[in-house]
Amino acid sequence: MRIKLPHAPYIARKIAIDLLNSGFIKFKSGTEPIAAVAKDILCVDINKERALEERVKELLDQNENEIDFMQVDRKSMFWLIKKKLAKDFGVMLAYDDRYSSLSHEILQKLWKDDLIDYEVSENRVKNLIYNAIESYLKQYEAIEDSVIDRLENYKKKVVPGTDEYDLIFEKLYEEELRKRGMI
């Protein structure tokens, strides 16, 4: 599953919490700097993919007439172009490889910035970070469904897409994450 920008802070906090709860990692400055490093790295990666997709959209728009003339499926063409340009933008499209690389990058930055210390293998810590990302993404849909159910049964009816709806959704989403020990 793809990581979206609004989820980066939640995933970053989950990484910090999982590292803290592991029992084999010592924090030198608390969880906030850990979460900040993870969030920054995740946001850079997400923005690289956004830039790639914007470029693909530009190319499709520039060649709209040819696409229509050849009766090519726009969605398929989008994916083919994205695949072709991914390396130039530094984006890995295989999510397992991507999350593994992000986990390694987060670990390296945490170590380089002297925010953590550990006496287990580097791979074990990297896997812990990877599992935090995967775990969040697997639970994301269930959490969102739960929040939507709660909103539908909300005393005051709120209209999706409004600022009020977004604020209530965000509040309930964070509440659900707390219940699940993710923040």
Image: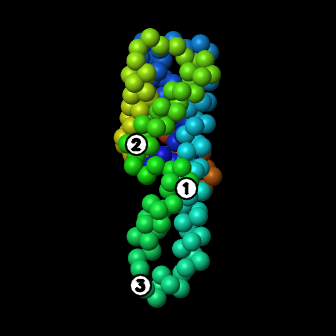
* Mark seen at residue 97: 2
Question: Gap in Å between the C-alphas at discs 1 and 2?
Answer: 17 Å
Which kind of residue does numbered mark 1 sit on?
A: Asp
Residue 183 in view, yes or no: no
**Mark 3 Cα shell of 10 Å, populated few (<14), some (14-19), many (≥20):** few
Would you say the residues marked 1 and 2 are in contact, meaning their CB atoms lie under 8 Å apart?
no
Tell me which residue sits at (60%, 43%) in the image. 44
SS of the residue under disc 1: helix
Is 36 rendered above or below residue 170? Answer: above
Is 119 rendered above or below residue 169? Answer: above
Tell me which residue sits at (43%, 39%) in the image. 99
* Mark seen at residue 71: 3
Which kind of residue does numbered mark 3 sit on?
A: Gln
Q: In front of the other: label 1 or label 2?
A: 1
In the rendered structure, which disc, 1 or 2, sits on the residue that comes first in sequence?
1
Question: Gap in Å between the C-alphas at discs 1 and 3?
Answer: 28 Å
Q: State the residue position of label 1.
A: 88
Q: Where is residue 181 in the image (x, y as percent from the top left)?
A: 44, 26
Question: Gap in Å between the C-alphas at discs 2 and 3?
Answer: 34 Å
Q: Where is residue 70 in the image (x, y as percent from the top left)?
A: 43, 86
**Which quadrant holds residue 18?**
top left
